[in-house]
């Protein structure tokens, strides 16, 4: 090695040793065979139910639009005042069996639920802190355990949403850009907080039969909201805190290597993660402004999450319920972009899911009963035209989902060698012309189609 090379190697090692940003995630992560199998399952599963449920559900947004699980932050509620809520949380109508059955009826293959949201209250029987549903609420039942057992019973998987951000724990310090009105002491021990977080994560990974973790709140660690709204790379600008992701991810994978880890940090994946998520957006669209940019889409399985109305947690006045058409188009658009769709409901404080949501979920399930073949187990592509159509593919069949009913005919360029084309639902043949790479056919749209799905069978 020449001296220039040698000095640059020494320099790199020195930077690695002194840099506060070194070793943020597992530097190298090789998923195990079990983990790769789990990723395949995840990609095949395609739709899941997201559930935001916690103390905040009692307040239902306080009569204001846009507030639900963020009420502690948005209404500047102190820890002392918020701590009155557990005693009021008595959702006697909670029925794990009914929730899981509803998810199944909607065609969902997994449930992801808040085991701890930003308010810090654990929805499972945590031994690390008694700020949890079993020790703290009159209900006194571990709803996460009940869901775990019911999911097993009904054959669907369960993921644990876990907020890294914590508005309750005194050691979550330095504060990020949220949780500053909680009247906690302006001091704390960051490492102690991480130990607490990891102890809870360990409980969840060890004691529950789950499929993985859905982390959130990592993005809190910037100085202010303005910085957060700008596209920031948290690897560089994160309030001088180190989340020690490598430690948390390794802890989980050492317990059960198949557990899938995703983190809603809105950035390119970090090593140690197994799937990448997108919030209120199709992958890469970033219409929210705080989402993940197109160039940050990595190689991992993808998942996009969305609210069934406008709120994650229960909001009393939110009537902005999405229609069946909107949800079906979301499912199809996500699958066409090789992504899962995680649809959120915010159950009410009595433990029930709103009737409007039950209805549309059942309708979605009826649509999935017919069209599921074109979604489950497929991969996105190979054809896509924004707002016009997307495709999914499995083996020698491509499913073309036409989103634009007004398109009279479709002309596109593709090397695909086509044996036959037919409407998916009634198998009626579609006449097509293929000259070289040019494919042309009349849009077989029929009145009542939410999307018009065409089955394209490829030649061997
Ligand atoms: O702040 C949370 C929000 O409450 C909700 O949990 C969503 C779900 O994707 N994630 C965060 C915002 O990015």
Image: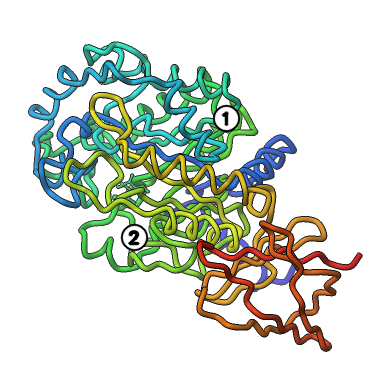
Q: Is residue 117 left or right of residue 43?
A: left
Q: Which residue is mark 2?
A: 237
Q: How is the image coloured?
A: rainbow
Q: Is residue 344 left or right of residue 316?
A: right
| Position of residue 1 measured from the top left corner of the image (x, y, whole percent) | 75, 67
Q: Around disc 2, counting alpha carbons within 10 Å, would you say few (fewer than 14), some (14 to 19), or many (20 or more)?
A: some
Could you tell me if residue 212 is visible in this image?
yes
Q: Around disc 1, counting alpha carbons within 10 Å, would you say few (fewer than 14), some (14 to 19), or many (20 or more)?
A: many
Quarter of the image for residue 400 reads bottom right
| Position of residue 115 measured from the top left corner of the image (x, y, whole percent) | 38, 29
Q: Is mark 1 within 8 Å of ligand 1?
A: no
Label 1 secondary element: loop
Quarter of the image for residue 227 reads bottom left
Q: Which mark is residue 156?
A: 1
- Depicted 141 relative to depicted 245: above or below: above
User: Total number of numbered labels?
Assistant: 2
Answer with mark 2 or mark 1, whichever residue precedes in sequence. Answer: 1
Q: Is residue 33 left or right of residue 328?
A: right
């Amino acid at each position: 090695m020449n001296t220039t090379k040698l000095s640059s190697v020494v320099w790199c090692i020195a930077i690695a040793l002194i840099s506060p940003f070194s070793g943020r995630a597992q530097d190298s992560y090789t998923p195990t065979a079990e983990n790769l199998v789990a990723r395949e399952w995840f990609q095949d599963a395609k739709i899941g139910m997201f559930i935001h449920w916690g103390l905040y559900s009692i307040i239902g947004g306080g009569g204001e639009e846009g507030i639900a699980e963020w009420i502690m932050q948005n209404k500047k509620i102190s820890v002392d005042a918020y701590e009155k809520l557990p005693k009021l949380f008595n959702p006697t109508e909670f029925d794990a069996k009914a929730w899981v059955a509803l998810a199944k009826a909607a065609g969902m293959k997994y449930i992801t639920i808040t085991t701890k949201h930003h308010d810090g209250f654990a929805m499972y029987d945590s031994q690390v802190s008694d700020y949890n549903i079993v020790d703290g609420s009159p209900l006194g039942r571990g709803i996460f355990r009940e869901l775990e057992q019911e999911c097993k019973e009904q054959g669907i998987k369960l993921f644990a949403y876990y907020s890294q951000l914590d508005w309750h724990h005194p050691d979550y310090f330095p504060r990020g850009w949220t949780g500053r009105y909680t009247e906690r002491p302006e001091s704390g021990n960051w490492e102690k907080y991480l130990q607490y977080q990891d102890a809870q994560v360990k409980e969840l990974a060890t004691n529950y039969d789950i499929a993985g973790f859905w982390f959130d709140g990592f993005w809190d660690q910037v100085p202010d909201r303005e910085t957060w709204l700008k596209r920031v790379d948290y690897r560089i600008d994160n309030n001088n805190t180190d989340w020690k992701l490598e430690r948390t991810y390794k802890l989980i994978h050492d317990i059960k290597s198949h557990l899938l880890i995703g983190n809603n940090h809105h950035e390119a994946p970090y090593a140690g993660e197994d799937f990448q998520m997108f919030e209120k957006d199709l992958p890469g669209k970033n219409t929210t402004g705080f989402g993940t940019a197109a160039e940050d889409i990595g190689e991992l399985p993808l998942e996009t999450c969305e609210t069934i109305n406008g709120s994650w947690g229960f909001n009393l006045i939110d009537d902005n319920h999405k229609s069946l058409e909107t949800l079906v188009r979301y499912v199809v658009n996500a699958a066409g972009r090789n992504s899962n769709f995680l649809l959120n409901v915010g159950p009410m404080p009595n433990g029930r899911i709103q009737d409007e949501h039950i209805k549309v979920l059942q309708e979605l399930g009826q649509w999935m009963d017919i069209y599921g073949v074109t979604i489950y187990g497929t991969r996105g592509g190979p054809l896509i035209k924004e707002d016009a159509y997307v495709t999914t593919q499995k083996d020698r069949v491509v499913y073309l989902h036409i989103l634009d009913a007004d398109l009279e005919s479709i002309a596109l360029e593709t090397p695909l060698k086509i044996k036959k084309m037919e409407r998916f639902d009634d198998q009626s043949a579609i006449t097509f012309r293929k000259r070289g790479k040019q494919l042309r056919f009349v849009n077989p749209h029929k009145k009542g189609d939410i999307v018009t799905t065409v089955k394209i069978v490829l030649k061997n």
